């Protein structure tokens, strides 16, 4: 893949901010013209309500929504009827935590490295919460997982790829062990889906959540995948127009999934734009994207890993961290690192606790700086980032 050619599709690089080196992709990616144009097409050509009215404009919307669902299903290796459109990955995870009829007294088993979106819903639910501790190496401890996987665990709900360290859990093995135990499995795929090929049927995962804004798509669109039997058992978070077959003054009959979970007016332009984002990623190829990110991460890591003033969050080996480079510099707050990068080199990175507070507080770490890579980032940008970090160390580090 040629990131220089790819960059021509992204309006940022033709704007007044064209000099920005955007390394905050784990938070949100940029959007190509193809996605923006597809969203604008909705507002210009058929700005109507899908799934209800039967006039030509509404019919076009319905067709476009169905097409987007089919594209995402093909991309993920599942059936369209198993995909629910939500606002984001957070809402998807909440639907399961609060809508599935878990047996009384049962537990959820997570990791100790979860994003708040897969932590808070369980803390505030009626199900008990347990977690697998991650060793200092940063690599998932499968033996520790098996020790915690007992008969009271109704569901294993884990981050697939971590947003802080970039590590990926052995999902297939985790799922097989959980199923042998009689437990369901849900994966938070917010950081894995944009960066590698996911085949949900091969994984045999029961539920899987992700957001389109991390994979070139619009904000405000998430997806929840669930197997048929789970969709039948699970209750929606909200109810209303679009999810109902019929009602009277005392009862309601819900439509079958996925409509059962999609009440109210949907984000039509966002869903249509999501289909365009899937088309764009498919043209590049997910294997190419994964290799590109690892190569760029290796450039950064090779330059900085032996600097005594830098602490890379484990594991240090770049091939184990996807496109994420999380680090601290001795004597400098992570927010200061981010601000200096922006001021002196127009480099945009993330700082703080990255919505993973328990991970940091349990380890006595006051956050970190994080550079995260994607399809439009270049070797030259990575070299400039490394140069900037070395300058910050030389100039400001204690």
Image (cartoon, rainbow, N blue to C red):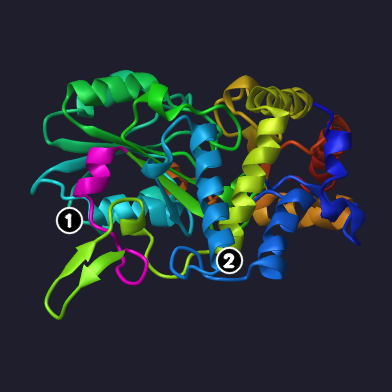
Q: Is residue 184 above or below residue 129?
A: above
Residue 14 at x, y percent in the picture: 91, 54
Q: 258 or 277, which lies in front?
A: 258
Magenta-colored stretch includes residue 19: no
Under circle 2, the secondary element is: helix
Q: Residue furthest left?
A: 104
Dot 2 or dot 1: first in sequence order is 2
Residue 383 at x, y percent in the picture: 86, 33
- Secondary structure mostly seen in the magenta stretch: loop
Q: Which mark is residue 126?
A: 1
Mark closer to the observer (2, 1): 2
Magenta-colored stretch includes residue 232: yes
**Residue in the picture at 55% in, 46% down:** 67
| Residue 143 horizontal side relative to residue 11, left or right | left
Name which quarter of the figure residue 230 lies in: top left
**Number of numbered markers:** 2
First to last magenta residue range: 227-243
| Residue 296 horizontal side relative to residue 162, left or right | right
Few, some or many residues within 10 Å of mark 1 (<14, 14–19, 20+): some
Quadrant including the N terminus: top right
């Amino acid at each position: 893949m040629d990131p220089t050619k790819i960059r021509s599709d992204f309006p940022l690089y033709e704007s007044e901010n064209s000099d920005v080196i955007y390394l905050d992709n784990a938070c949100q990616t940029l959007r190509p013209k193809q996605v923006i144009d597809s969203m604008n097409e909705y507002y210009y050509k058929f700005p109507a309500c899908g799934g209800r009215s039967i006039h030509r404009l509404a019919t076009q919307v319905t067709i476009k929504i169905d097409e987007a669902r089919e594209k995402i299903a093909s991309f993920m290796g599942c059936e369209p009827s198993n995909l629910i459109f939500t606002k984001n990955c957070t809402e998807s995870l909440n639907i399961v935590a609060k809508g599935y009829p878990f047996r009384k007294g049962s537990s959820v088993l997570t990791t100790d490295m979860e994003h708040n979106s897969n932590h808070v819903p369980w803390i505030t639910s009626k199900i008990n919460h347990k977690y697998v501790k991650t060793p200092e190496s940063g690599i998932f401890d499968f033996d520790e997982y098996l020790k915690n996987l007992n008969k009271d665990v109704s569901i294993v709900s884990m981050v697939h790829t971590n947003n802080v360290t970039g590590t990926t859990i052995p999902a297939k093995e985790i799922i097989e062990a959980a199923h042998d135990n009689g437990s369901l499995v849900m994966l938070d795929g917010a950081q894995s889906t944009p960066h590698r090929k996911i085949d949900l049927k091969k994984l045999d995962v029961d539920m899987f959540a992700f957001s389109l804004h991390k994979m070139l798509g619009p904000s405000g669109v998430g997806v929840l995948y669930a197997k048929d039997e789970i969709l039948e058992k699970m209750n929606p978070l909200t109810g209303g127009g679009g999810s109902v077959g019929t009602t009277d003054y005392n009862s309601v009959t819900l439509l079958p999934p996925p409509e059962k979970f999609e009440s109210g007016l949907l984000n039509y332009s966002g869903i249509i734009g999501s289909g365009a984002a899937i088309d764009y990623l498919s043209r590049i190829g997910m294997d190419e994207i994964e290799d590109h990110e690892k190569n760029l991460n290796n450039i950064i890591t090779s330059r900085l890993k032996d600097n005594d003033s830098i602490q890379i969050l484990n594991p240090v080996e770049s091939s184990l961290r996807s496109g994420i480079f999380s680090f601290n510099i001795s004597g400098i707050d992570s927010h200061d690192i981010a601000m200096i990068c922006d001021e002196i080199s127009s480099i945009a990175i993330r700082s703080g606790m990255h919505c993973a507070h328990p991970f940091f507080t349990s380890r006595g770490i006051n956050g970190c700086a994080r550079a995260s890579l994607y399809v439009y980032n270049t070797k030259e940008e990575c070299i400039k980032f490394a140069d900037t970090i070395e300058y910050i160390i030389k100039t400001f580090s204690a």
